[in-house]
Image (tube, helix red, strand yellow):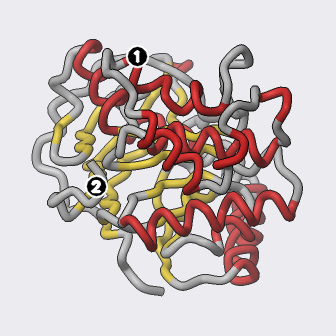
Amino acid sequence: MTNSATPEAVQLWSVRRTYGSGDNAVTALDGVTLAFPTGTFTAVMGPSGSGKSTLLHCAAGLDRPTDGTVVVAGTDLGPLSEHALTLLRRDGVGFVFQSFNLVSALTAEQNVALPLRLAGRRPDRARVLAGLAEVGLADRAGHRPSELSGGQQQRVAIARALVTRPAVLFADEPTGALDTVTSHEVLALLRGTVDRHGQTVIMVTHDPAAAGYADRVVFLADGRVVDVVSGLDAEAVATRMARLEATAARPSPAGTGAPRRRPDGPGGSAPADGSGPAAPVDARREA
């Protein structure tokens, strides 16, 4: 599904995610409207509890928003049943997480082929091996995770995420468990999938150096989009993050009635129809 004809790989319209109710209600996303263009690399950043992971979970169909609309590769996720959502995640979306989530008893080749087998498809061995070669592990196909370094395991996880040719690859802190040198290798690999194959990548990260590999950075605070900027290097990203974190550390003025926030987490209430939102913030907007 890479290089979809849909100009926006992912769209969010007035997405709100609230956990609990009444006096115990906490807001993780507060009316987020965004568009992620096909074939681009976007980093999502913000202070702790800003809604980064909740945004990724809602955009990827792992969690349902309380209100609003999420569209992935032209498909509105709201009306989909849980079974249909599972099929969309399996066939149209790739995931890479901080923990590699490889099956320890399987070889690298078998781990990469696993999504195809789970979909009931006979894996094309040449395609699987080509995927491993693409991430620089052609000579590690027969190795199990325990025989691979952390960076190699993450590269296997990336090859596995891409083997179904998804419309979008979501990465949640993909370098969080890696050293600096290995992190840059993995980020260069993600950058290469965008540049060579037109893959859409949406990455949540706390690391300004990681965000420096992206085409654009979406900054969140208190569950809201506060900026979308293109062309930032790691130093510029770090400066903006320092400002956001300083602002987040200040106590709210008395009597403002600011909504309670919580760190990102799982949930599962059905979305409303989200009719009549404003046009999404286009992640192509320049500084």
Q: Residue at x 75, y 65 (%)?
A: 184
Amino acid bearing label 1: Leu
For mark 1, what is the residue? 118
Q: Residue at x 21, y 15 (%)?
A: 81
**Would residue 18 be visible to someone looking at this image?**
yes
Q: Residue furthest left?
A: 276
With 115 as the anchor, is 264 left or right in this view?
right
Amino acid bearing label 2: Ala
For mark 2, what is the residue? 9
**Between 7 and 185, which is closer to the camera in this rendering?**
185
Q: Residues within 10 Å of mark 2 (few under 14, many from 20)?
A: many
With 19 as the anchor, is 107 left or right in this view?
right
Q: Position of residue 189 (x, y in %)?
A: 61, 62
For the residues marked 1 and 2, what is the alpha-carbon distance in whole angstroms?
24 Å
Q: Position of residue 202 (x, y in %)?
A: 48, 55
- Against 218, is 260 above or below? above
**Between 92 and 215, which is closer to the camera in this rendering?**
92
With 149 as the anchor, is 264 left or right in this view?
left
Indicate which disc, 1 or 2, sits on the residue closer to the N terminus. Answer: 2
Q: Residue at x 18, y 52 (%)?
A: 277
Q: Position of residue 151 (x, y in %)?
A: 78, 48
Q: Position of residue 157 (x, y in %)?
A: 61, 38
* Residue 253 quadrant: bottom right
**Between 229 and 61, which is closer to the camera in this rendering?**
61
